[in-house]
Image: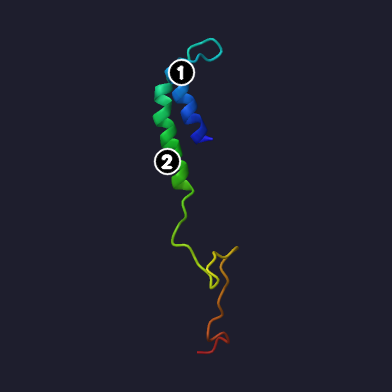
Amino acid sequence: MFVVLVPANVYAAIEGVPLNGDPATPLWLRIPEQIVYITIALWATRPVGPPRITARGRRPCGPPKRVASENASGTP
């Protein structure tokens, strides 16, 4: 949605498109603001840490599986 609104605001700013007969808010100020919002959205959805790869070369689905320790009986 962000990406669609940037060209629309550029067009409206260049052509002086009114909003319900009134002059629109300063569109040239909205464009840098939208770039900031796009950057924040991309930053918030970035992967955290390196991707885990399975033996088949694909990322696993779901939570990681627990591996049983060698000494599961609890004796030292």
Vertical relation: 28 (above or below) 16? below
Give the quarter of the image for residue 10: top left
**Amino acid type assigned to the residue bearing label 2 in the image:** Thr
**On the image, numbered disc 1 is attached to which residue?**
25
In the rendered image, the residue lying farthest to the right is 62
**Amino acid type assigned to the residue bearing label 1 in the image:** Thr
- Residue for point 53% across, 85% down: 70
- Residue for point 45% across, 16% down: 15
**On the image, numbered disc 2 is attached to which residue?**
39
Find numbered disc 1 in the image and state the secondary structure of the residue it sits on.
Answer: loop
Point out residue 21 in the picture as x, y percentages from the top left corner: 54, 10
Q: In which quarter of the image is the N terminus?
A: top right
- Residue for point 43% across, 20% down: 13
What number is the disc on residue 34? Answer: none
Vertical relation: 67 (above or below) 3? below
Point out residue 67 in the picture as x, y percentages from the top left corner: 55, 77
